[in-house]
Image (cartoon, rainbow, N blue to C red):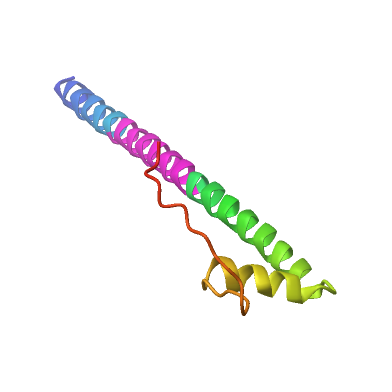
Amino acid sequence: MANSKSKAPKKQNKSFILTLALVLLVGYFVITIVGLQFSIKERQDVLEQKNAVYEEQVDENERLQAIVDSEDKSEYLEKIAREKLGFIKPNEKVFYDVTPGV
């Protein structure tokens, strides 16, 4: 009988260790999955931002392509020359408003 009593605590000890290991393993997996979900969410947010920038660039490209494909390029070039480069036509008078802004 002394023999059967000494085996019981070892079995309970192994069961406790196995249960503890299983709980720790499940906890590790839960923590890992939660961390991965946060990482996925962050990457989805970055992807949405980049897609928005991409769509804006596509719209801008389409606008510029329409200008390039249009028949009247001289009007566009004149507008750019006046606004961006400050060019004027010969004998043209340019007036600048130098009053302080209100």
The region drawn magenta spans: 21-43
Q: Which quadrant would the C terminus be assigned to in this image?
A: top left
When the figure is inspected, residue 58 is found, relative to residue 100, above or below; the finding is below
The picture quadrant where one finds residue 65 is: bottom right
The picture quadrant where one finds residue 63 is: bottom right
Front one among 41 and 65: 65
Q: Residue at x 37, y 44 (%)?
A: 100
Judge left or right: residue 61 versus residue 29.
Answer: right
- Residue 27 painted magenta: yes
Q: Residue at x 78, y 67 (%)?
A: 66
State the image coordinates of residue 32 (x, y, percent, origin top left): 37, 42
Q: How many marks?
A: 0
Front one among 74 and 55: 74
Front one among 102 and 70: 102
Front one among 99 and 102: 99
Q: Residue at x 26, y 28 (%)?
A: 11
The picture quadrant where one finds residue 24 is: top left
Single out the residue that lies furthest toward the bottom: 90
State the image coordinates of residue 3 (x, y, percent, origin top left): 17, 26
Single out the residue that lies furthest toward the right: 71
State the image coordinates of residue 101 (x, y, percent, origin top left): 40, 41
When the figure is inspected, residue 97 is found, relative to residue 26, above or below; the finding is below
Dominant SS in magenta: helix
State the image coordinates of residue 82 (x, y, percent, origin top left): 59, 69
When the figure is inspected, residue 10 is found, relative to residue 64, above or below; the finding is above
Judge left or right: residue 72 versus residue 58.
Answer: right
Q: Which quadrant would the N terminus be assigned to in this image?
A: top left
